[in-house]
């Protein structure tokens, strides 16, 4: 980016918004407003449609998957989304839910986090850039209630993530993983194996 900071970045700083120079140093004011309006639209959809008490009978299998598609997630068929699921609305395009995925209530899917790889004593945390990563939930997997899935994670086909888990690494297909951080605790057997 060089020593010259963009006018937009300086304007944002004057408004008191402490954005990372790395990410916001080279954007236009139009980009800022465009992103802001998109985020407001998505926030409205997520707040008022995802958890509507009036629509609860159709919400988990019909309405919530549709809302996630509207905000940019790639959502397959017969997906179940529980109540109070939080997604990274600003990066919804990085969320892929294949067919028959189940996400229980109060889960969080987070596609960005601060990049701490170049964070040292005396640095300003707020000036660090973000690391983005796609979340890919493969066919038929289950994310248990209250779990958090971090950026760059793939949960394999048929895998089960136990309630309250923190998923920081990929979970292989047909396994059960649980904990903070989540670790595989069991391989799911073929029918008839004993």
Image: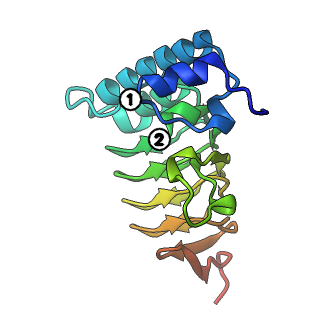
Report the residue that reaches farthest toward the front: 3
For mark 2, what is the residue?
A: 87
Identify the image quadrant of the N terminus.
Answer: top right
Question: Disc number at residue 152?
Answer: none
Of 45 and 127, nearer the camera is 127
- Spatial CA distance of label 2 from label 1 is 9 Å
Name the residue at 42% across, 32% down: 64
Left or right: 53 in relation to 183 = left
Residue 102's place in the image compared with 91, above or below, is below
Identify the image quadrant of the C terminus.
Answer: bottom right
Task: From the top left corner, tell me how far across and down residue 11 is, in percent.
Answer: 52, 19
Name the residue at 49% across, 51% down: 102
Neighbourhood count class around disc 2 (C-alpha, 10 Å): few under 14, some 14–19, many 20 upward: many
Left or right: 113 in relation to 152 = left
Residue 169's place in the image compared with 47, above or below, is below
Report the residue that reaches farthest toward the bottom: 194
Q: Is residue 157 visible?
A: no
Task: From the top left corner, tell me how far across and down residue 16 is, in percent.
Answer: 41, 29
Report the residue that reaches farthest toward the top: 30
Of 46 and 99, nearer the camera is 46
Q: Secondary structure at mark 2?
A: strand
Task: From the top left corner, tell me how far across and down residue 109 is, in percent.
Answer: 50, 48
Neighbourhood count class around disc 1 (C-alpha, 10 Å): few under 14, some 14–19, many 20 upward: many
Which of the 4 quarters of the picture holds residue 116? bottom right
Report the residue that reaches farthest toward the right: 2
Residue 35's place in the image compared with 115, above or below, is above
Q: Secondary structure at mark 1?
A: helix
Asked if labels 1 and 2 touch by Cβ distance under 8 angstroms, the answer is yes
Question: Disc number at residue 46?
Answer: 1
């Amino acid at each position: 980016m060089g020593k010259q900071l963009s006018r937009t970045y300086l304007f944002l700083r004057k408004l008191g918004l402490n954005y990372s120079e790395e990410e916001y140093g080279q954007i236009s004011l139009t980009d800022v407003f465009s992103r802001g309006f998109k985020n407001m639209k998505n926030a409205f959809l997520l707040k008022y449609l995802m958890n509507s008490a009036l629509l609860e009978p159709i919400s988990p299998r019909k309405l919530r998957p549709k809302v996630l598609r509207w905000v940019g997630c790639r959502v397959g068929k017969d997906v179940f989304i529980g109540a109070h699921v939080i997604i990274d609305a600003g990066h919804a395009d990085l969320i892929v839910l294949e067919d028959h995925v189940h996400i229980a209530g109060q889960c969080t899917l987070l596609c960005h986090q601060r990049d701490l790889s170049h964070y040292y004593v005396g640095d300003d945390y707020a000036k660090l850039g973000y690391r983005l990563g796609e979340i890919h939930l493969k066919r038929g997997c289950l994310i248990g209630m209250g779990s958090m899935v971090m950026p760059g994670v793939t949960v394999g086909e048929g895998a089960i993530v136990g309630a309250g888990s923190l998923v920081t690494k990929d979970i292989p297909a047909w396994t059960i993983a649980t904990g903070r951080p989540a670790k595989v605790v069991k391989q799911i057997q073929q029918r008839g194996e004993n």
